[in-house]
Image (spheres, rainbow, N blue to C red):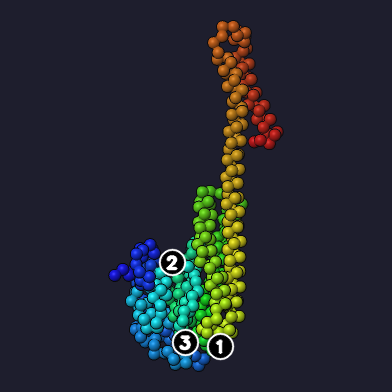
Amino acid sequence: MIESLNTASGKSGLPPGSLVHVGSVQADETRISLLDYNQDALNEREIDSVSELMAHRGSGTVTWVIVEGLANVGVVEEIGDLLGIHKLVLEDILNTNQRPKFEEYENCLFIVLKALMPQEGRFAVVYEQVSLLVLEDLVLVFKEKQDELLHAVQQRLRTSKGRLRKLGPDFLTYSILDSIIDRNFILIDELDAAITGLEDELLMSEPTRDTLHSIQKLRREIVHIRRYISPLRELVGEMLRSESRLIDEKTHIYLRDVFDHIIRIMESIEIHRDILAGLMEIYVSSVSNRMNEVMKVLTAFASIFIPLTFLTGIYGMNFEYMPELGWKWAYPALWVVFALIPVLLLLYFKRKNWL
């Protein structure tokens, strides 16, 4: 049985609902963490068996299960069988090239989005798919990596007895979405710093081929960023329009706040895309101006040698009667003319500001 593929094209011919991991393997082992809480208490631990999460169902608490590492298809399949999750949902969880989306099912809500994180040292974006299953008293999060992406939300649960501990799984879902989406503001700041550096390089010094490569790289990154952030507007919009009993009306005001954040992020991305387009035009203009300067110098030298070549051509002809050839001072006079022509032309070019 195939358990992991690099691209979705490898699934061609397989029936719908075939559980195959698609994408690069980010974690060899699957780790399952459980946080079970209410207003008064929090129970946090790692579990070895999927069946352990059922012990907390129906106890009046909210259970948050984090599954990190998707290469073990059996774990995802076991969770799906235990909770009655549709095979198509499990298939989408295992396909890490999914477009962000929101889907409603009879017993759960399904959310997929990408977490975007800037790479340290240079501007590059690291992508991680995050899938959420929201049930009556349970939220499951499926992540590709074992990292600290949701550490801030976990820390709020550990230290706070406020709104997050009082409200249900829909508010926990909002908190997770808000934490992931707000990370994009860090990404925007990094992008702004990278573009500012390129602007300084273009305006303060001569652009090089490396400058062009940097501009093209940033433009390509922005295309990928837009691909994963743009659908978030539709995702949160569908959550706001949903009539599912799993999303309380009181949570809508918080989801609208997330929607506003997405709009701000998208506007910033569009602005930076326009700036990069302008930088590309500046680069092309700068290269063109530099080429014009080179051509101007070459044209000036050609203009100087044209009359010299003309004179050389005349006196190089084999005519028998050329009066100047018999003159005693003809040769020195010709050299004087040869010297004067470049000097006069250079003075003329300088006066016209052509050089």
Residue under numbered circle 1: 162
How packed is label 3: few (under 14 Cα within 10 Å), some, or many (20 or more)?
A: some
Callout 3: SS: loop
Task: Give the CA separation, mark 1 to mark 2.
Answer: 36 Å
Q: Name the disc covering residue 97, or none.
A: 2
The numbered mark, 3 or 1, whose residue comes first in the sequence reads 3
Label at residue 137: 3
Inspect the image, locate mark 1, and give the three-letter code of the amino acid beneath it.
Answer: Gly
For label 1, the SS is: loop
Look at the picture and state if 270 lies above or below 252: above
Question: Disc 1 or 2, which lies upstream in sequence?
Answer: 2
Residues at marks 2 and 3, CA–CA distance in whole angstroms: 28 Å
Residue 307, horizontal then vertical, whole percent: 61, 22
Question: Which quadrant does the C terminus fall into?
Answer: top right
Using the image, tell me which numbered label, if any, was put on residue 107.
none
Tell me which amino acid carries mark 2.
Asn
